[in-house]
Structures are given as structure tokens and as C-alpha cells.
Image (tube, grey):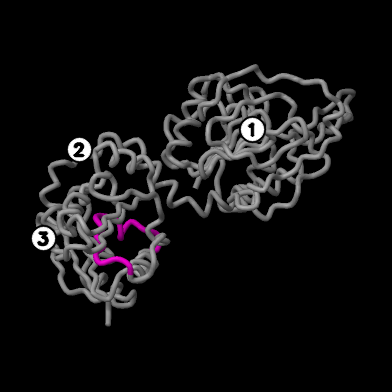
Amino acid sequence: MTVVVMHDAGGQAPAAVSRVLAGAGLASRTVPLADGAGAPADLTGVEGLILLGGPGSAQEDQALVRGALAAGVPVLALGTGARLLARAAGAAAGSPAGTCFDTAADRRAVELTPAADSDPLFAGAALPSPGLRPERDPLELPAGAVVLAFCDGYPEQAFRIDAGAWGIRFLPAPPALPQDDGAGGTTPPGPALDPWAERLLGRFATLVAARAEHTATRTFFTHRADAWEERFAHQTPAYEAAVARLRLEPGGRAVDLGCGTGRAMPALRTRVGPRGHVLGVDVTPAMLASAARHGRTRHGYLIAADCTRLPLAGASVHGIFSAGVLDHLRDPYAALREWARVTAADGVLLLFHPSGRAERAARHGRALDPGDLLAEHNLRPALETSGWHLDEYEDAAGHFLARAVPRT
């Protein structure tokens, strides 16, 4: 797991950054903010992004931040890095960063807003250190940004964009004076983090590690979402045939888990009829946006959610359709238990893939893995211990299908 740390050109990232990230099991890669030099071409393998400064004028830098926002990669922007984050999120450029001379502002305390109480990063955090100085340059925030910290006269001291990008504008106390190097010269002070900022960085590192699986999924699918439907449109008849194997009754409630662009949703709607309910669930907002562009909202509702923590009542679903998801989850057993929780006693689960296991292995140049979760000798006990009974299993040349019902 890697976090990219972007810092001012000519400077360096505080040593505490790599130390705190390493403590959370995260590697770090530092990149200077200098016309995008050294910035990764994409976010593959990147679980987090930290912005430690820079004017945010380089298009390459802004493009990388925009990509992180689109893919849901967690972002933490400190100091002037918050300006780069805000601009990449669509805020007006406004006046360039500068110095606003208001010495009285240095004595004003930075306070947390009520929104901070439920924020994923700020909730439970102590109040900022008294030595932190408010940022006095005005900054227009993008639409929908949530203010998390303010100071009298300078309201946008910290903010969140979407669910995973934070800008922290108030500054640590000035660094210590240069020290005598013992050879007639001086040693410039190295960059440092205020203790409060270091603790916040630790909370961010923990959040990045916890979200790593979702981040990797979103990063992989976000830049593929626009072409996904056209690329796999030929599989639609196979999806329709698989949905028929659910044998749903009219008026039932059906869920397409890991729905992507929602190719199964029209067939699910046909099966449950106008009185039924269809829900498409995916963890990647870009895929859901593509599903909406292709008219899937005519067939049901689309929500962004973790398939191991569904926002559904127990025993509320009659049919779950899931294509190519289970064996890619970090904890498939937790997923199966959650799917059993939301499924009614007369419900059914259908695991599907439009190609068989042998075909997929050959396509990737490898032999069949006896440890593959979808192999019948592995899948059957996995289902049985998670609240399901496997009643149909097909691993054919042209498709994979496993049908299970709740254990009684």
C-alpha cells in the first residue's frame, strides 16, 4: 500500500510523514510539485495522496488530484496544499495565495464546527493546538464542501470534499531558528509537523489502510467505467439467462451486488415486474454514473455501498444476483454472511460469471487453482458455514453459475 506525498519544489517532506505512514503499514513516495515532474501517470497502486504545498498551477498536479477525487482515493491537503485541492475540485482560482497582515488573527483560536463531530477524520479528535495560526488568505471552496474548522473572521480553516478528501489550512507555529553547524555556518531547520497535525496524519493513515481494498477497486474501475458497457454488451444474453435461474416471483425484491453498469437490472425488473423492487449496488461511483447514463435507473435504484455492509433490513430481499464479485473480496465469508442476513427465508443467491473457471484461468495464462474459492469443493463449505445451502453448481465452458438458498 503506497501513499504519494506531493510537496513544494525545492523543499522536502517532513520526516514525520514517512514515519507515521510506515506505522500504519503504508509505504510513501515523495514527489515535488514542479510542473508535475515525477508525478505518477495514474493512480494504480496508490491508496492515498498527501499534498504538502504548492500553488496548484501545474495542470499535471491538478489532473492527478482530480483523478484521486473521481476514484475516491483518500486525500489529505495541508497548508497551501488545501488550495490545490480546492481548485482541483472545481473552486474558482480567486486571488493567489499570499500574506494577509492581521497580527490579531494570530491570537484567534481555531475551532471545530459541529460537522466535525461526524466526520470520518475529525470525529473524536482533540481541539487544534493553541499554537496553530489561522490561515488568513481567502479561499473559495467548491460546491458541496463541508467546513470542519473555522476562526472568527476566517471561516474556511478546514474542509472536506466528498467522503474522503480533506483540506487543513491553519498553520503550525513558525519553525525554529537555524542552528549553528559548528563550522562557522548555520543549518536550516528541517520541515516539521505540529503535534496536532502529526496526530491528524496518523488518523488519516489509519483511514487509508482501512479503505485500501475499496480504493484499489475504485481506482481500477473508475477510468474503465465509460467504456465498460460497450466492451461487454455482448454478454447481455448470458446475464438474462442467469437471472432467469433465480426464479424470482413478481412483486419480489432483487439486488444486483457489484452491479457495475447494471447489465442485470433490466432482466431483474422483468422478473419482479412493476410491483417489485430492483436495487443496483456498487462501491465505485463512476460505474454507477455510467449505469445511470445507460438508463438503468428506469429499472431500479442505484446506490454506492460496501457489499459486506449493506444498508438493507434483515430478511428484506428475495433474490441476490452477483457476477464476478465474491472471489475478489478480502473477506468473502463476511460478504456471504451479510448476504444471508438480508435475504428472506424463501430467497435465493446466484453467483455468476459469463465464462467458466478453466476459461478464465487459460485467458490469464495459469492453471486452475485448487484453492480457488469458486471451486465446488471450496464453495460448498464456504456457503454452508455462512448460512447458505448450495443447490445448483455449474462450471461450464461458457459460464459459471452457483445457486444457493438460505439454510433452514
Quarter of the image holding residue 225?
top left
* Residue 172: % across, % down: 77, 36
Asked whether residue 92 appears in the rendered view, the answer is yes
Read off the residue under disc 2: 231
Furthest-bottom residue in view? 408
Looking at the rendered image, the quarter that the C terminus falls into is bottom left
Left/right of residue 69 with respect to residue 149 in the rendered view: left
Residues 179 and 23: in front is 23
Question: Measuring 71% from the left and 43% from the top, which residue is drawn there?
Answer: 197
Question: Measuring 48% from the left and 23% from the top, which residue is drawn there?
Answer: 60
Left/right of residue 47 with respect to residue 198 in the rendered view: left
Q: Start and end of the magenta stretch?
A: 316-331
Please say if the residues under marks 2 and 1 sit with CB atoms less than 8 Å apart.
Answer: no
The tag on residue 396 is 3
Q: Amino acid at mark 1?
A: Leu
Q: CA distance from mark 3 to mark 2?
A: 22 Å
